[in-house]
Image (spheres, rainbow, N blue to C red):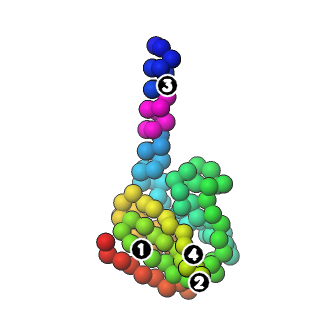
Amino acid sequence: MQLMDWVILFCFIISAISLYFSFGSKFYDPEKVLIDMGDHVFISHLPKARLHKKYGKTISKSFVTKIQLAGNYVTLFNNSGNAIDIWAPKNKLAKPIFEQAKNIFRNAETVEINC
């Protein structure tokens, strides 16, 4: 095989792995996306955050004042209007994340928008 063939093969493998981590439903388990740590919550809002914690966010439970489900997005809002979007590849994967968020952020207002 020539060098160009190896480069193409390598790119294909990396693309396949990326798609697996982005769309594999086991990576959208609500307990893995929103990890309750007492007064704080670690959010794996990006697929790559499930591979390495440095890509996720840790927030205080008091940060979230509103939780919104719109299609396949769960959005966590704070008082100043800042938000964290959690994307799931399918609506049926976003709904359990929304329910987990409601359990963790019990004082937050909840909104469901049918898209």
**Type of amino acid under label 2:** Asn
Label 1 Cα crowd, 10 Å radius (few <14 / some 14-19 / many 20+): many
Nearer-N-terminus badge (2/1) = 1
**Type of amino acid under label 3:** Val
Label 4 Cα crowd, 10 Å radius (few <14 / some 14-19 / many 20+): few
Instruction: Work out whether 14 lies above or below 62.
Output: above
Instruction: Work out whether 115 lies above or below 46.
Output: below
User: Could you tell me which residue is drawn at 48 percent across and 54 percent down?
Assistant: 27
What residue occupies the far left of the structure in this picture?
115
Q: Mark 2 points at which residue?
A: 79
Q: Name the residue under label 1.
A: 69
**SS at mark 1 in the image:** strand
Q: Mark 4 points at which residue?
A: 82
**Type of amino acid under label 4:** Asn
Whole-number angstrom distance, CA of label 3 to CA of label 1: 41 Å
Q: Out of 99 and 69, give the one closest to the viewer.
A: 69
Asked whether residue 105 is in view, the answer is: no
**SS at mark 3 in the image:** helix
User: Could you tell me which residue is drawn at 54 percent across and 69 percent down?
Assistant: 84
Nearer-N-terminus badge (1/4) = 1
Q: Name the residue under label 3.
A: 7
